[in-house]
Amino acid sequence: MKIKEITYCGVMIAIIVAFSLVPPIAVPVIPVPISFQTMAVMLAGSLLGKKLGTISVLIFLLLVAVGMPLLIGGRGGFSIFLGPTAGYLLSWPISAFSIGWLLEKIGKLNFWKYLIANLIGGMLVMNLIGAIGLSFIIHMPILKAIISTTMFFPGDIIKTVIVAFIAVKLQQTHIIKLDN
């Protein structure tokens, strides 16, 4: 990896950590809060692409697994990956990869293409994998878990719009320029 790529990954990890400072919003139906860190994961895939976005998120999760308190509420440690949010956390690198892959396949990028890639690769992938994990861990019927995650959709749609806007602006100003 080039120094520039390592730097981008480091900055993205810092952004994911910074988003943990936004307090979570508790959800009454399931033990999974609304977190703004998911927006940072979408940014990773949108700005760094499938390879570097995924690497950034994987390194972040590795830091969490070894005990660094980098998740919302200052949580960290391997036990996090055994709780109700495990499926969502495990979906993050898959989402970053999916978003980067979709954007790579789409071609010339604009707001709508970023939005679609984040809706599919981000919002839908995260919520589907998260619901499967939630179902498995808290012994909830899978259909009920999937339906319960639809409460995240309004906020997730807003997050994808913001991510698409940021990605387009950074693309236009050439702040992030990868040699892919």
Image: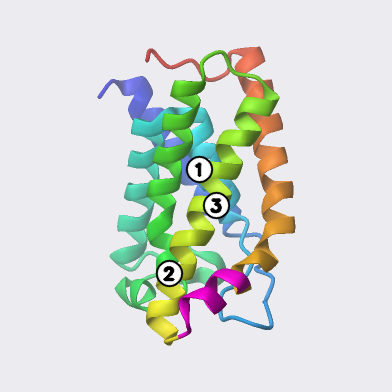
Residue type of the residue flagged with mark 1: Gly
Q: Amino acid at mark 3?
A: Leu
Q: Which residues are magenta?
A: 140-147
- Residue 154 at x, y percent in the picture: 74, 57
Q: Quadrant of residue 175?
A: top right
Where in the figure is residue 119, as x and y percent of width and height? Answer: 60, 43
Task: Name the residue rendered at 50%, 43% in the picture.
Answer: 121
Quadrant containing the N terminus in the rendered view = top left
Residue occupied by mark 1? 121
Residue 145 appears in the figure = yes
Determine crowd level at label 1: few under 14, some 14-19, many 20+ residues with C-alpha closer than 10 A.
many
Q: CA distance from mark 1 to mark 2?
A: 16 Å
In the image, 153 versus 13, the foreground residue is 153
Q: Earlier in the sequence, mark 3 or mark 2?
A: 3
Name the residue beneath numbered marker 3: 124
Main secondary structure found in the magenta portion: helix
Mark 1 vs mark 3, CA separation in Å? 6 Å
